[in-house]
Image (cartoon, grey):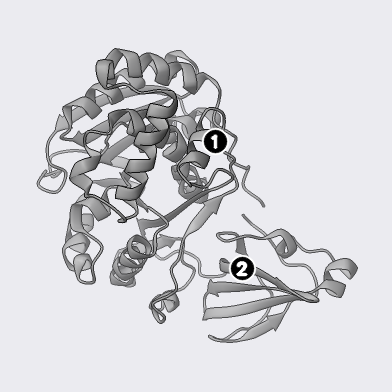
Amino acid sequence: MTSPPTPPLEAGWNEVLDRVGREVLGPDDRAGQALAAQVTALSRVYTGREGSLADAASAHAARLRFYLPRDLPKIEGPLAELSPALEGPRWRVLDVGAGYGTTSLGVARFARRHGVEAVEVTAIERDPRAIDAFTALARRAPEAGLTAALSLDVRRADARAFDAGRLGPFDLICLGLSLGELFGTDPGAELAAEPYLRALAARLAPGGALVVIEPALRTHARALQRLRDRFLEGALRVHAPCFTDAPCPLLRRERDWCHGQLPLPLPVPLAPIAEAAGLRRTRLTYSYLTLREGAPARDRWRIVGGPVRSKGKAEWDACGPAGLVKLRRLERDQKRSPSPLDAAERGAAFAIDAALSDGASLRVRGEVDCPR
């Protein structure tokens, strides 16, 4: 069964963000070319080309008016993979390093479409301007019918130093684009991040999940892959994106990294700003890690590369139970027997009726099951 596609961001978000921008940012608000310039500068910081994360703290308009609505849907891919495990009329959420509320608002938007009555968020954030904006958004977004009912309890604190031991239990714990800021992305950062995540996961309710979302940058994604390898055994296990309990095969070569994507075009007015900043405008990319208790099924394969199309064929890299394999479809096979694989892009998951080993190459002649 294929999960419903993530719908484009509703036009009502523009009005809500306009109101909150004027209300909270005041003279620091930006629009038009001034906003585009700030987004461009912040993009250079985020990609490590120029400046430091300390410089991002003052880019309030870019964070609220562009990066929040652009990144808000990213949580929906991991959430779709948790369904129906994450259910019930009310979701209790811990948002660590919440910022302007991007991830929690994405959760509440997803929850509204799936019949969840209310989302109760405990947010850990130290930036007072971000807290003010998140508080205003948590009030206005449900009023505009953009999210499920949303209650917000903000704890102003440093996310890394905060002790969550008295909070919870939670159905969902999220770290949206914050783990790399807390621990860095250099090799060895996973040694400190692992006990931190385990301590947070101890606050999960039975059946709950912890989701980490990071940028789809090589440094961030590979840091998350190294961290993922520290959860191959024990009660807390990797639920997604992986379908193997072996060490990550994409860590073998420095040039490889794992990330997902959503085919979601940016709406007006975000698209022209993205174009001016040299950013993607037709799809969202991100890396992620979902942890839950219990060993999940390891019977599917994830597309982690491709399609690479050359004369007469298309090829994909797939990661699954046996490791990393290459799938190949000839054009004549595509015409003779269409398959969901033909249109598959990075992040798609498949069940393949074949015995494969690490490094194998399979010519897929017919149908494959596409559960997502």
Mark 2 to mark 1 CA distance (whole Å): 25 Å
Q: Residues within 10 Å of mark 1 (few under 14, many from 20)?
A: some
Viewport quadrant of the C terminus: bottom right
| Residue 201 visible, this orientation | no
Percent of width and height locating residue 324? 53, 79
Q: Going by the image, does 217 lie left or right of 310?
A: left
Left or right of residue 276: residue 21: left
Visible residue check, residue 82: yes
Name the residue at 60% across, 86% down: 360
Seen at 66% across and 50% down, the residue is 2
Q: Is residue 139 above or below residue 213?
A: above
Where residue 156 sits, quadrant-wise, is top left
The tag on residue 306 is 2
- Residue 35 location, x and y as percent? 39, 29
Instruction: Classify mark 2: helix, strand or loop.
Output: strand
Chain-order first, disc 2 or disc 1: 1
Residue 271's disc number: 1
Q: Residue at x 32, y 56 (%)?
A: 49
Name the residue furthest right: 336
| SS assignment at label 1 | helix
Across and down, in percent, residue 106 comes to 43, 35
